[in-house]
Image: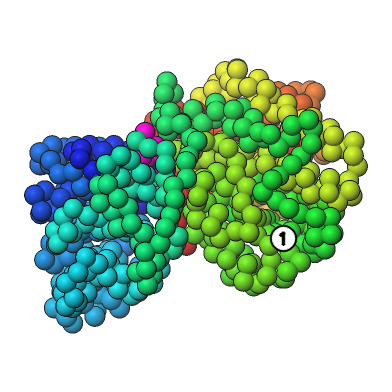
């Protein structure tokens, strides 16, 4: 979950490192630090607090070195403090390490090192790494060009858990080593310089050519060259992939926050996600080669993901079942992986992950693969870890999502899932063709309709001003409107810290209605015309108990005591969450802003959850 950056070249490293960290702050923001090679000696500057604090630390300005590593932390082991901040040094201050991930066996390794005479100054799991490198380096009596790499490799063989590591050493002041296992890391290739980062946007303004490492692959970097090695330290060849994202996508531009910018980018994100997959009203996926025979044999589809991505999965369940007539289960990845799900080679499993790095989602995928199921990953990040594990990978084209609260990734995910459901349905020929044609036509209208909602947000802003001081809110809906309520509620709680619950309207009176009292805010979404009457009856039940109601709807509903009705455009019900979520995203945004909170970096959260 932490962010890491590295630079090796001819320019002063510290500004590049700090700027890169600033772009990665969505990964963690409780402490930050850099280590720079200064005349063959490692200089470390670090402290708790945000990345900006680094500029104020004594001696940072004076650093002249052109090779360095950097880290922004999301604390796991040890509270945020200077000692626990990265980079960490070994006892002889010859090896500096930054780490993203968790070393699960660090206690054991620490005990072994203490027996060898090493001491520790932090409570982190990471500090064992530079000391183990030191240990193996000293043990190795062979003096050749691979000595440091061997020490790093021997260290990695001892580590259990996940890691992306950057290492510099005064023993080899002109080089850097990086390696990963189950944690993200990319290498950006420049001319006479190379960049490293845990996420592409951090270094996108310097290069568009990236190397991607697989687990236990080592990159040995100099200014002009990157050499790659496997676990046995055999040299391997890798080529770069060119990334289309434009560096502006990772900048806020004229927007006050990334979240607002990303909400407004949704029409473009949806349009580009549909791309050419629906040209001439035919759905095609070059990435998939599903035959009718294969699809007919599928016994079940599992859609597995976390958080917002899982909510996108819930929206698509109905559509898959309706169009393909295959039973679909949507699972939380962290539950799926430990519940021994019924999977065999006739099961299709779909994983949704914006980052492509979520530890639980990747672990769930690996589990299903072991059991013989086909695995299909939907992600936004080219070359992300999940794409290296899945049988098939399909990209959303939302562009970099920087705000911790996911917005454009969600609407792109719902869109792509609808397209995949239609793609399968067309091969299976089990669905009503008129329904399919109507859906296809509506999918193409989504960008314009989202634009329409975004053109006038005054009503939502006004409502946000009325309710931002509240302590609890409820989001209600039936069918897909229930699915969108879950997501609306998550958006609100994560950036406004207001407690909220997304509930199926019909379920409220089985318990939670006890919480409805005078003045409690209830937000109801109604887009399914078959369920309007029933939804309104449920709303009346809470109005009677004093609730204040905001209704988001595309139906012509008479105002029967609601505080506000927000009308959104008509669209096929199955994909209506792409539209109905937009006012809910905007509501969460303005409530957070009214409260003066850090919208883009809410407390305790990090953008990409690379630990279990
Ligand atoms: C909420 C949010 C998270 C993510 C979840 C999965 O706004 O962003 O709930 O959706 O952590 O992340 P990915 O999609 O990267 O696997």
In the image, is 578 to the left or to the right of 355?
right
In the image, residue 126 lies in the stretch drawn in magenta: no
| Residue closest to the eye, 27 or 89 | 89
**How is the structure coloured here?**
rainbow
In the image, residue 202 lies in the stretch drawn in magenta: yes
Say if 248 sits above or below 356 in the image: above
Whether the residue carrying mark 1 lies under 8 Å from ligand 1 is answered with no
Residue labelled with disc 1:
348
| Residue closest to the eye, 418 or 333 | 418
| Image location (x, y in percent) of residue 556 | 80, 23
**Does the rendering let one see residue 595?**
no
Dot 1 crowding, Cα within 10 Å, few <14, some 14–19, many 20+: many
Which residues, given as a range, are shown in magenta? 200-205
Say if 64 sits above or below 124 in the image: above
| Image location (x, y in percent) of residue 107 | 30, 75
| Image location (x, y in percent) of residue 364 | 58, 63
**Does the rendering let one see residue 342?**
yes
Residue at image point 62% right, 71% down? 370
Residue at image point 62% right, 64% down? 336
Q: Secondary structure at mark 1?
A: strand
| Image location (x, y in percent) of residue 568 | 70, 25
Residue 272 figure quarter: top right
In the image, is 126 to the left or to the right of 171?
right
């Amino acid at each position: 979950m932490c962010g890491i950056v590295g630079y090796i070249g001819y320019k002063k490293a510290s500004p590049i490192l700090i700027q890169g960290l600033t772009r990665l702050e969505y990964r963690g923001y409780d402490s930050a630090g850099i280590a720079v090679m200064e005349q063959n000696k490692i200089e470390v500057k670090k402290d708790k607090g945000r990345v900006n604090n680094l500029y104020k630390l004594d001696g940072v300005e004076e650093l002249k070195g052109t090779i360095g590593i950097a880290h922004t932390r999301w604390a796991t082991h040890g509270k945020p403090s200077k000692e626990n901040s990265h980079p960490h040094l070994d006892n002889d201050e010859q090896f500096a390490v930054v780490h993203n991930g968790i070393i699960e066996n660090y206690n054991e390794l620490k005990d072994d090192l203490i027996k060898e005479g090493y001491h520790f100054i932090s409570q982190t799991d990471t500090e064992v790494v530079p000391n183990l490198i030191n240990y193996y380096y000293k043990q190795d009596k062979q003096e050749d060009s691979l000595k440091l790499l061997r020490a790093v490799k021997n260290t990695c063989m001892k580590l259990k858990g996940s890691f992306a590591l950057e290492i510099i050493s005064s023993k080899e002041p002109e080089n850097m080593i990086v390696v990963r296992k189950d944690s993200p890391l990319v290498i950006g290739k420049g001319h006479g310089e190379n960049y490293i980062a845990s996420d592409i946007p951090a270094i996108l303004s310097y290069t568009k050519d990236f190397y991607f490492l697989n687990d236990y692959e080592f990159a040995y970097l100099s200014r002009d060259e990157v050499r790659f090695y496997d676990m046995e330290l055999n040299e391997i060849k890798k080529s770069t992939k060119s990334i289309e994202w434009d560096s502006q996508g990772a900048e806020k531009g004229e927007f006050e926050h990334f979240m607002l910018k990303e909400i407004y980018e949704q029409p473009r994100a949806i349009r580009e996600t549909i791309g050419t997959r629906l040209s001439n009203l035919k759905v095609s996926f070059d990435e998939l080669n599903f035959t009718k025979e294969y699809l007919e044999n599928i016994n079940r589809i599992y859609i597995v993901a976390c958080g917002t991505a899982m909510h996108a999965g819930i929206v698509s369940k109905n559509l898959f079942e309706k169009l393909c007539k295959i039973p679909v289960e949507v699972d939380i990845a962290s539950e799926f992986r430990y519940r021994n799900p019924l999977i065999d080679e006739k099961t299709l499993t779909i994983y949704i992950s914006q980052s492509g790095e979520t530890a639980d989602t990747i672990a769930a995928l690996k589990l299903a693969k072991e059991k013989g199921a086909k695995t299909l990953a939907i992600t936004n990040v080219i070359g992300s870890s999940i794409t290296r594990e899945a049988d098939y990978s399909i990209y959303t084209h939302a562009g970099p999502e920087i705000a911790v609260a996911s917005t454009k990734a969600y609407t792109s995910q719902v869109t792509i899932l609808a397209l995949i459901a239609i793609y399968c349905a067309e091969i299976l020929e089990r669905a009503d063709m008129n329904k399919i044609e109507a859906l296809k036509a509506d999918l193409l209208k989504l960008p314009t309709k989202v634009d329409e909602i975004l053109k006038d947000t005054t009503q939502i802003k006004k409502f946000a001003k009325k309710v931002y001081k509240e302590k609890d809110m409820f989001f209600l809906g039936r069918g897909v409107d229930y699915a969108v309520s879950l997501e609306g509620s998550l958006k609100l709680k994560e950036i406004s810290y207001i407690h909220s619950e997304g509930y199926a309207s019909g379920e409220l009176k089985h318990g939670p209605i006890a919480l409805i009292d005078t003045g409690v805010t209830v937000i109801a979404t109604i887009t399914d015309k078959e369920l309007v009457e029933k939804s309104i009856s449920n709303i009346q039940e809470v109005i009677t108990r004093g609730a204040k109601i905001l209704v988001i709807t595309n139906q012509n509903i008479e105002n029967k005591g609601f505080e506000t009705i927000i009308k959104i455009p008509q669209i096929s019900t199955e994909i209506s969450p792409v539209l109905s979520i937009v006012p809910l995203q905007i509501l969460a945004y303005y409530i957070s802003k009214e409260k003066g909170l850090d919208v883009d970096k809410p407390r305790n959260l990090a953008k990409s959850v690379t630990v279990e």
